[in-house]
């Protein structure tokens, strides 16, 4: 697992398995607009087609944002999310 840089923005985690990447951002909540922009921007700036996921503790911002999945971190850790 690595940390990635996209310009001056940072991707929290880059996981690799079987030569495939998966990008992750981790935040307590995405409900604040500034936080949402800060967390999603690096993922939007990636030009490949590997999966991109934001793990959050809130349950108000879950869903798909132009191919970037926002999932609850607890559900993800417990295997209750299909985006693992």
Image (cartoon, grey):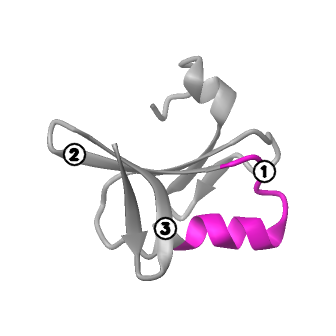
Main secondary structure along the magenta-highlighted residues: helix
Q: Is residue 39 magenta?
A: yes
- Return the residue at label 3: 10
Question: Residue at left 64%, top 25%?
Answer: 75
Q: CA distance from mark 3 to mark 2?
A: 19 Å
Which stretch is magenta?
27-41
Q: Is residue 59 left or right of residue 8?
A: right
Question: Residue at left 47%, top 61%?
Answer: 11
Name the quadrant containing residue 37: bottom right
Q: Is residue 80 above or below residue 14?
A: above
Question: Residue at left 75%, top 39%?
Answer: 57
Residue 73, percent from left and from top: 64, 34
- Secondary element at tag 2: strand
Q: Quadrant of the N terminus?
A: top left
Mark 3 or mark 2: which comes first in sequence? Answer: 3
- Return the residue at label 1: 29
Mark 1 or mark 2: which comes first in sequence? Answer: 2
């Amino acid at each position: 697992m690595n940390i990635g840089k996209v310009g001056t923005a940072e991707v929290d985690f880059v996981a690799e398995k079987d030569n495939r990447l998966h990008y992750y951002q981790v935040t307590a909540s995405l409900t604040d607009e500034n936080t949402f922009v800060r967390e999603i921007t690096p993922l939007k700036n990636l030009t490949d087609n590997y999966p991109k996921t934001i793990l959050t503790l809130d349950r108000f911002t879950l869903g798909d944002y132009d191919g970037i999945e926002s999932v609850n971190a607890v559900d993800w850790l417990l295997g209750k999310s299909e985006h693992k």
